[in-house]
Image (cartoon, grey):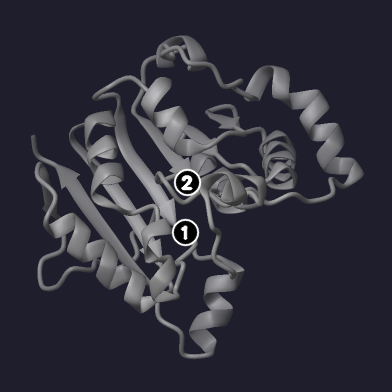
Amino acid sequence: MRQFKSQAEAEAAGVYVSKVKSFVKREGRLTKAQEKALADYWPTKGIDYSESTLSLPDVFGRSAPVVVEIGFGMGKSLVEMAANAPEKDFIGIEVHRPGVGACLADASEQGVENLRVMEHDAVEVLKNMIPDGSLSRLQLFFPDPWHKKRHHKRRIVQPEFVELVRTKLAVGGCFHMATDWEQYAEHMAEVMNNAEGYTNTATDSDYVPRPDYRPITKFETRGQKLGHGVWDLIYERTK
């Protein structure tokens, strides 16, 4: 990827380099089913972005542990997690509009009621909408690794971001990351091990076995058959 001479030039190209954001905007064409799902289900399962703090009990109509996932892709694993844990409430944040539509369609088809979705930059959502100390878990699965060294500063897992996550987690809540890029896993562990207020839940290394609640994706299964690894990291907020 080419370098940009200024922030304005980068922003014009949809690449953000001066501050950590959760994404580079990806456009895609909606299928008719995705378009219909957005029209039909956004009024009940979508959350519009605003710079005001959400009342999570009002959003879901109850008080329950809340899990937020950043970058859920097409949403299949997120819908599965919500379906398998009806005692929890889930918020998925994704900027890829076809993925948002697909997630809404799957959730409706499976009758999943404990899931809401947002189409916005997750960093801004966390800063402006998620109450402090309100989350039982924050999930970041397979984020862009920005594998070239000159692009490492664009990785979302940076000290400023993990401190933001810590403030949104309840004490005892967990930040769960997963990646199939070993160097990014090492970067995640380095950042987290130097972050205040977190404890690594792993017992004999920086990484933990995939917990049962995280579904294994077709992409992940295919990668494992090719000998690719996947690394899960779970850090608990301790203060």
| Residue in front for this viewpoint, 193 or 209 | 193
Left or right of 76, for residue 70: left
Left or right of 194, for residue 207: right
**Going 66% across and 46% down the picture, which residue do you hit?**
12
Q: Is residue 87 visible?
A: no
Position of 24 relative to 105 (above/below): below
2 or 1: tag closer to the N-terminus: 2
State the quadrant of the C terminus: top left
Q: CA distance from mark 2 to mark 1?
A: 8 Å
Residue at disc 2, secondary structure: loop
Q: Is residue 214 visible?
A: yes
Res 103 → quadrant: top right
In the picture of the structure, the residue carrying the numbered disc 1 is 143
- Check if mark 2's residue and mark 1's residue have beta carbons within 8 Å: yes
Position in image of residue 229 (x %, y %)? 40, 81
In the picture of the structure, the residue carrying the numbered disc 2 is 22
